[in-house]
Image (cartoon, rainbow, N blue to C red):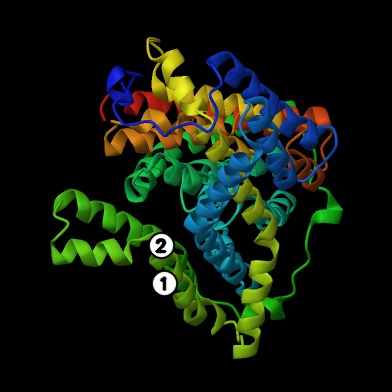
Amino acid sequence: MTRLSVEMLAADPVEPITSAGHAQLGIAVLAGIAVIVLLITKFKLHAFLALTIGSLALGAFAGAPLDKVITSFTAGLGSTVAGVGVLIALGAILGKMLADSGGADQVVDTILAKAGGRSMPWAMVLIASVIGLPLFFEVGVVLLIPVVLMVAKRGNYSLMRIGIPALAGLSVMHGLVPPHPGPLVAIDAVKADLGVTLALGVLVAIPTVIIAGPLFAKYAARWVDVPAPERMIPQRNSEELKRRPGFGATLLTIMLPVILMLSKALVDIVIDDPENTVQRVFDVIGSPLIALLAAVLLGIFTLLSPAGFSKERVSGLVEKGLAPIAGILLIVGAGGGFKQTLIDTGVGQMVLDISKDWSIPALLLAWLIAVAIRLATGSATVATVSAAGLVAPLAVGMSTGETALLVLAIGAGSLFFSHVNDAGFWLVKEYFGLSVGQTIKTWSVMETIISVVAGAIVLLLSLFI
């Protein structure tokens, strides 16, 4: 198991922008995070503004010159947006294509037609996991919950028995599997290999979603037995369902980025020669940018054309797909700025200096840090990008597999116990028509199970990687 060690400190540390000691830096970190938490929870400030102000507060408490703090923050914001911004944009476009073309409906209806009875919760996990690959969590929730409500109503199923597996599939994909924003930012921060992280993320996700989805749903349905709220059940006419893409074409489009990125990872392992022509070709087509771009271009022919989209309508769809992600890009970018401020003030090195003699595994430390920030801020993305900045120095000296597990440990921690300061908490509460207590008994407990189970699996895998 990877532990904090002297070898990890071998790399030359970046000269910090402040001469503050460990005590002052520790206070600065707590103060910076406290500012972010208060602004988000108490004053309801947008996370982008809260992260920006929190970064400046961190630098001020650390005694760093304000001009250097601003430089660190803007550099981190720019590099983060440059690294993952295009990928988030392409993912948003692909998600919009799936939703507007009826491709997502096609996948859902095809799987549901072949499932029934006791297999329905498992079908919902499969649907959510497949649909959740290219979609942001919030988009997936908006897309799938109406389907969950229809299935529960028409099949006379317990709402929690059907809903929890769907939510688990979406949440696991969001926290553990790139190209979702959180994992992408963590991969960039610790310099992990995306293909290896993707492969290990899927490996961790499968048992995690089974335990937190269909298995936990049995108990959740006993704790909270509520009917599907009538006002949220959509009415779709048969005419709308006639013009939509086929199941196979839709599935191929959704899975193409994953196939290309996994192929690159496999070729890198088998050939392991940067000068080899085959490997260089797969390095290009398996890069996240090309993989997602290929899926978007393919989607024009496999999703939009069968649905009868004109060229003008395709252009409009792209614009509509990009508009909602402005806030996400700003939050992710500001998280990158906060991360860079942490690094440049010397906080990352402080973590290493203080804990180099500890026996605590680095993966467990990463998980715990992400848990603390998640509980405080309510945002899985903020928890991921902030924790990644704090533990990035731990990746020095790690192997490719170990850095991938570090990313997954952070992602697992970022999902711990969603509660009232998390937008997802209220989204689930309102869609399912639950009380705050019922949402905690179901959604919050499910998120905690995902976090703990995924974290435990990551620690287990580290014994062999």
Distance between mark 1 and mark 2 Cα atoms: 8 Å
The quadrant of the picture occupied by the N terminus is top left
Q: Secondary structure at mark 1?
A: helix
At horizontal 69% and vertical 34% (from top left) the residue drawn is 443
Q: Which residue is mark 2?
A: 257
Foreground of the two, 197 or 335: 335
Res. 294 mark = 1
- Residue 365 vs residue 324: left or right? left
Quadrant assignment, res 287: bottom left
The picture places residue 255, in percent across and down from the top left corner, at: 42, 62
The picture places residue 345, in percent across and down from the top left corner, at: 54, 31
**From where the camera sits, is residue 418 visible?**
no
At horizontal 79% and vertical 57% (from top left) the residue drawn is 233
**From where the camera sits, is residue 259 visible?**
yes
Q: Is residue 328 above or below residue 409?
A: below
Q: Is residue 126 above or below residue 214?
A: below
At horizontal 41% and vertical 62% (from top left) the residue drawn is 257
Quadrant assignment, res 349: top left
Foreground of the two, 6 or 155: 6
Quadrant assignment, res 262: bottom left
Question: Which three-letter amino acid code belongs to the residue tagged 1?
Answer: Ala
In the rendered picture of this protein, how many numbered marks are placed on residues? 2
- Residue 285 vs residue 108: left or right? left
Foreground of the two, 383 or 314: 383
- N-term-proximal mark, 1 vs 2: 2
Question: Which three-letter amino acid code belongs to the residue tagged 2?
Answer: Pro
Pointer 1 with pointer 2, Cβ within 8 A: yes
The picture places residue 216, in percent across and down from the top left corner, at: 59, 30
